[in-house]
Amino acid sequence: MGGYQFISKEPQHTLEFAKRLAEKLQPGDVIALEGDLGAGKTTFTKGLAVGLGVSRTVNSPTFTIIKEYQGRLPLYHMDVYRVEDSFEDLGFDEYFEGNGVTVVEWAHLIKEQLPEELLTIYLYHEEEQSRKIVLEPQGTRYEQLCKEIF
Ligand SMILES: Nc1ncnc2c1ncn2[C@@H]1O[C@H](COP(=O)(O)OP(=O)(O)OP(=O)(O)O)[C@@H](O)[C@H]1O
Ligand SMILES: [Mg+2]
């Protein structure tokens, strides 16, 4: 494993990387975002939204769990931090199998419901302004995607 990682020196760097990734995304792609509070999951999602041509501002959907945005492809932004238990079914499948891109903050909290193939992105706090960002692809589609952007 490994190889697909870098240090983001500031929020803008994370945004730019996510934007570049977004340009390569396809209908049905699923991205799991993992990292502590304030690691940058929502920041990363904002960059994806820009890259997908979403004009609305993406903010933290903590109290709504799922938010939809229109862009080149629809963006489904989930934050499952407040999901009661890992089997609670809020119709996630329909999003994963839909024709948009799904991004899930705290994805491991619903791990039983995640698709087998997805791209997991870990964000680790390094210092005030820097984050280690590690991409872990599951499946050939996401392996290919990582190769293209690194
Ligand atoms: N290199 C960096 N990349 C991303 N964010 C950074 C970086 N350096 C500093 N930050 C700051 O860290 C914060 C990250 O907040 P953000 O809401 O994106 O985190 P989160 O992981 O979504 O948190 P939560 O678990 O509460 O949802 C922002 O204030 C952002 O400006
Ligand atoms: Mg967040």
Image (cartoon, rainbow, N blue to C red):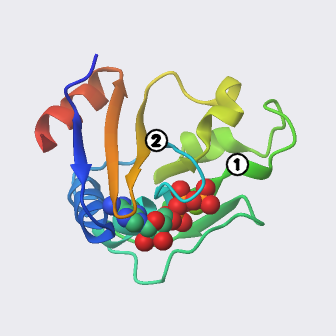
First in residue order: circle 1 vs circle 2:
2
For ligand 2, tell me if the residue under mark 2 lies within 8 Å.
no
What amino acid is labelled 1 in the image?
Val
**Farthest residue toward the front?**
127
Q: Is residue 140 left or right of residue 97?
A: left
What amino acid is labelled 2 in the image?
Val
**In which quadrant of the rendered view does residue 89 lie?**
top right
Q: Which residue is mark 2?
A: 30
In the picture, the disc for residue 80 is 1
**In which quadrant of the rendered view does residue 47 lie?**
bottom left
Residue 66: where, in percent of width, then height?
A: 67, 59
Residue 123: where, in percent of width, then height?
A: 42, 45
**Real-space CA distance between mark 1 and mark 2, rounded to the nearest whole angstrom:** 14 Å
Residue 99 in sight here: yes
Residue 115: where, in percent of width, then height?
A: 55, 28
Residue drawn at point x = 58 percent, y = 49 percent: 105
For the N terminus, the image quarter is top left
Residue drawn at point x = 40 percent, y = 40 percent: 121
Which one is in front, 107 or 36? 36
Judge whether 16 appears above or below 114 on screen.
Answer: below
- Callout 2 secondary element: strand
Residue 19: where, in percent of width, then height?
A: 26, 63
For the C terminus, the image quarter is top left
**Farthest residue toward the top?**
1
In the picture, the disc for residue 18 is none
Residue drawn at point x = 40 percent, y = 83 percent: 55
Q: Is residue 22 left or right of residue 57?
A: left
Residue 76 in sight here: no
